[in-house]
Image: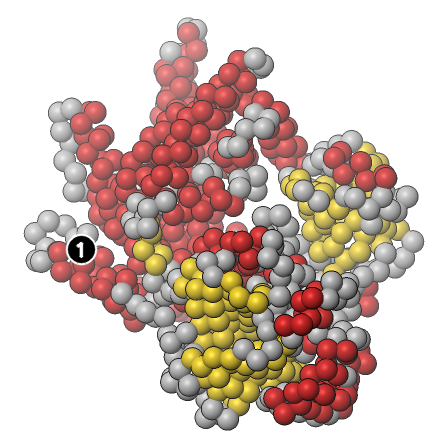
Amino acid sequence: MRCAILGFVAGAAVLQNAAALPSGTTLAALVALAVLLCLLRRSLCALAAGALLGFSWAALLAHLALAPQLARADEGRDITIVGTIDSLPHHFGQGVRFHFAVERVLGARIALPPRVALAWYSGYHRAVWQVGDVRPGERWQLTVRLNRPHGNANPHGFDYEVWLLERGLRATGYVRAEARSNRRLDGFVFSAGNLVERARAALRERILRALQGKRYAGVIVALVVGDQRAIEQSDWEVFNRTGVGHLISISGLHITMVAGLFAWLASALWRRSFFTQAQLPLLLPAQKVAALAGAGIAFLYVLLAGFGVPAQRTFYMLAVVALALWCGRITNVSHVLCAALGAVVLLDPWAVLQPGFWLSFGAVAVILYATTGRIAVGDGALREALRLGVRTQYVVTLGLVPLTMLLFAQVSLASPLANALAIPLISFVVTPLALVGSMLPAPLSTMLLWLAHLVVEALAFVLAGISASDVAVWHAPLPSAPVFCFALLGTVWMLAPRGWPHRWLGVVSWLPLLAGQPSHPAAGSMTVTAFDVGQGTALLIETSGHRLLYDTGPAYSPESNGGNRVIVPYLKARGISRLDGMVVTHSDVDHSGGALAIMQTIKVGWVASSLWFEHPIVRTAALHRRCSAGQSWNWDGVRFEMLHPTIASYDDPGLKPNARGCTLRITARAHSLLLAADIEALQEAQLVAGAAGSLRANVLLAPHHGSGTSSTPAFLAAVHPELALFQVGYRNRYKHPKAQVYALYGARGIRRLRSDQSGAISLQFGPALSAQEYRVVHARYWYGR
């Protein structure tokens, strides 16, 4: 059975990396073959049969999940719908986000998916006060505009589209705040899901009300109801650098602790027949009552947690143990782990794409491998518990190093010390106080919640000090498959039982893992990565020894931008900790929105921009220089030339920021790239008149995202590109690129690549010029191409 379950998980994982889904006939044939293999009753046959069934099951669920679709013709239309709020709403600075279960469409025959993700933005209309009243389980009538699922597609980036697919959200959009038809129809529509979400919302409101204005109130909310969205990004940085991020949620340890407490209480009361003469243990053994109570409480707690993978894993393991106890079967720990693994993937085949899935089951597997049967029972219970805790922390810290490097390209060196402090405080002090405090009546609840927050605040202060150290985290590029497997085998050797020869040699397997260096193009060559940042610009230019970032993407919200959501994760995955230079072409937020976030995380040698001297980016830069026509430099055989703006343009206060966009031409061997920022027709004409000979380039970044005010015929004739890049957002409100401009490029025989269709675009400038589209190279069935 264990082989079949492992094969099932492997088959589901293979499907999630497929570019297209198999047909129904193919699936039927695979299932038939799996049945035949099962009849052979061999371990390898069970593994293969499980893989075929896992692949087929995941494909079937994917077909069903992709079936509800919004027609392309219905994107961007005003649609009035009736339905219920079926998630915990997330309030942010500009409004509120929530999931909406559609019941019917009013006034039009439009086929809509059953669930959509909506945002309701404030500041557009006087009636938007209703935003604050959105609660789970309410029935609303809303006028909305919807889009098909779409997210930024970048190497090593978050895949928003599969996240939506996993949650059954087949359209996204926003509420038309000015619509008079928006109104609440019912205060609460009963269903099990709505009841759970309403309970979670009530607990969250209670905690936030008691801890109003407190910085770490979001941590308390995360520990009680599993909602982590109120935790600030800066705090997450500290938690992740110190390796305690796994505790800032309803973790398996917390669920086990609560389930064990209630199981012990139920057993104690049952043995005493609830202090009556009923002699209940004669009717049902106390052990079975304890198992039932523990599993039941664990299930309720997991529901409050939002049913995340770590919580699911813990519940399924407890359920398997409880079931075995009820059936009088002795349960092997490996059977329990495999049963939980199979249950998670059976119910959610997309779980294999989550880092938490591998970390959660990996941690349990490491603990079982390195501790089961190796710790003798001593005389002192406290001493033995301490010894077991230290041993567990030791094996988890070492055992997860290869997996952590594979998933995050970093490992926290401060993790053992930080976890030694955080695990007992969070698990045995903060979590019990937060749970009890969220349930008891005021003012006792307020006192307990304040005490829990005080402990978190003190712990965060210590963790911030640990995190500030330069040696708190070790960074290296994501390892290749051979390097990871070698490190994994060495780790297994290192954690082997005593008596195993030369266990310390396992450390040697980590050397390729931890000592990796970022890749570079060859001398004289150049690699350019045009990121998919939505409606904005960001390109990374790499030579054999230097790196330059041209613009930094847009600002999405006060805490989210192209820098910390797209560019920094990419740089960290590559093991890049320093940029030699950064060009911020002008002050528009779709070009400069991520600059500060990048400079706070990555060392930047110098910044060139057209910004005024009081701008925060200029003041933050270690070295700043103004973009000026005539500037040039050479890196590793690659020539960089600044063509615009002129130094005299800074004396004209009437110029728009676009007019001073830093325009850069880069030449590597026989090929050139022209980065034209957001210059418009007048600046194009000035360049054609004054520097026409310097404009010729094989690749052109379309000026101003292909707007109607740029890309004049004379300018395109002077540049004469083979390839044009359009960095634009999906269905952006500016309608970039304009249809007539896009057609003009096509009429000239210029190959056109759009980031909203291609995802990130990688260009190789060497003896030949080549381009790769991320959505093609990394094709997945949910991309819908």
* Label 1: few (<14), some (14–19) or many (≥20) C-alpha neighbours in 10 Å: many
Q: If the image is split into quadrants, where does the C terminus sit?
A: bottom right
> In the picture provided, is 475 more to the left or to the right than 373?
right
**Measuring 71% from the left and 70% from the top, which residue is drawn there?**
659
Residue topped by disc 1: 494
User: What is the x, y in percent for residue 376?
Assistant: 14, 35
> In the picture provided, is 198 more to the left or to the right than 576?
right
Q: Nearer the viewer, residue 261 or 423?
A: 423
User: What is the x, y in percent for residue 225?
Assistant: 54, 34
Compared with 378, 512 (above or below) is below
Tell me how many marks there are: 1
Q: Which of 231 and 110 is in front in this view?
A: 231
Q: Is residue 532 visible?
A: no
Which quadrant of the figure has residue 374? Answer: top left
Which quadrant of the figure has residue 108? Answer: bottom right
> In the picture provided, is 549 more to the left or to the right than 494?
right
Compared with 53, 224 (above or below) is above
**Measuring 56% from the left and 56% from the top, which residue is drawn there?**
617
> In the picture provided, is 215 more to the left or to the right than 188?
left
Which quadrant of the figure has residue 683? Answer: bottom right
User: What is the x, y in percent for residue 180?
Assistant: 90, 43
Compared with 3, 416 (above or below) is above
Q: Nearer the viewer, residue 744 or 190?
A: 744
User: What is the x, y in percent for residue 458?
Assistant: 40, 29
Q: Is mark 1 on a helix, strand or loop?
A: helix
Q: If the image is split into quadrants, where does the N terminus sit?
A: bottom left
**Measuring 88% from the left and 59% from the top, which residue is drawn there?**
109
**Measuring 63% from the left and 56% from the top, which residue is drawn there?**
555
Q: Which of 718 and 286 is in front in this view?
A: 718
Compared with 516, 495 (above or below) is above
Name the amino acid type tagged 1. Answer: Met
